[in-house]
Image (cartoon, rainbow, N blue to C red):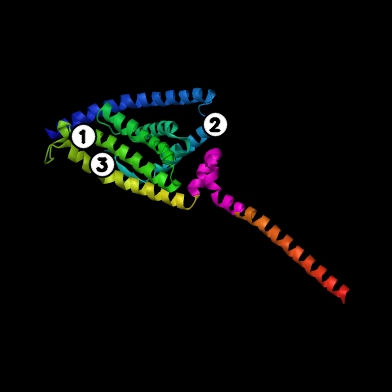
Amino acid sequence: MFLNNLLEVSGHTTDIITYITIGVLALLAVIVAAVCIGNRKKKFDTKSLAFAAICLATSFVLSFIKITPVPSGGSITLASWVPVLIYAYAYGAPKGFLVGIIFGLLNFISGPYILTPFTFILDYILAFAMVGLMGLARKFNRSLLTNVVLGTVIAVVARFVMHLISGMIYFAEDAIWVDLPTPNAFVYSLIYQLVYIPGDAVICLAVLIILAKSNVLQTLLHIMRPNEFSAAVNAKTDNRDAAISAQAPADKEGTKNSDLSEETAVSATADKKGKD
């Protein structure tokens, strides 16, 4: 009975995946067209599009490096969210949301796993769109390290909630309940998400903290948006130049006073010799 039910669900899911995959490809085409049209209206400059492509490609490649794959779609990856999080921080929430959605659709195409169309929306659209929340972290007006940590935590928590709701729908299916000790979809979904999302988040946080403390992140942000992040990158240089500039007048004044003292001493010596 369990096997028949499971096969029935699997067959139904396969049909859904086929239809949604076609829809995803069409949606990606629409997004690309919309971005191109927006670019003509100067909403997206060429540089932001280029970095979006670079960050998406890097995140997509990292998503294939799975440290501990989890059954039913979850996995701990090698900091696959880091490039798109950096992009969202550099270019803000709207572009971050868009890049996150595209990243989610690419993940679906590379390894689709859904049960219903609604779980597809939760797992691959809304969950990955939470990348864009990182773009709001700049408004905290704290240090770069603090902003990045807070932004990552907020994005991961929002992602966790989306996957949690999707998991509740998954575990609520009748065919899934066979051999499970208690019919509590929330508990099973919570346990499942805790298996991999916190681990994935810790890896992302560790990488971002290392990048921030080593000034690599500041350099990347400066390259991506020099008008927005040049002050942060050149803070030490600016302070050193300011100190040198402040010291220069003092040195000049000291030299001037020294010259005056020497002239006074010479004049006094000459006067003394004249009197003698």
Residue flagged by tag 1: what amino acid is it? Met
Q: Mark 2 points at which residue?
A: 46
Residue 3 placement: quadrant: top left
Dot 3 alpha-carbon crowd within 10 angstroms: few under 14, some 14 to 19, many 20 or more: some
The disc, 3 or 2, on the residue closer to the chain's N-terminal end is: 2
Vertically, is 251 above or below 63?
below
The disc, 3 or 1, on the residue closer to the chain's N-terminal end is: 1
Please give left or right for residue 127 compared with residue 257 in the image: left
Residue 162 placement: quadrant: top left
Q: Mark 3 points at which residue?
A: 193
Dot 1 alpha-carbon crowd within 10 angstroms: few under 14, some 14 to 19, many 20 or more: some
Dominant secondary structure of the magenta stretch? helix
Q: From the top left corner, tell me how far across and down residue 272 is, in percent.
A: 84, 74
Vertically, is 202 above or below 21?
below
Q: From the top left corner, tell me how far across and down residue 247 is, in percent.
A: 64, 57
Q: Give the CA distance from mark 2 to mark 1.
A: 41 Å
Question: Are the residues tagged 3 and 2 within 8 Å (C-beta)?
Answer: no
Q: From the top left corner, tell me how far across and down residue 235 is, in percent.
A: 54, 49
User: Which residues fall within the magenta stretch?
Assistant: 216-242
Q: Name the residue under label 1.
A: 168
Question: Are the residues tagged 3 and 1 within 8 Å (C-beta)?
Answer: no
In terms of secondary structure, where does tag 3 sit? helix
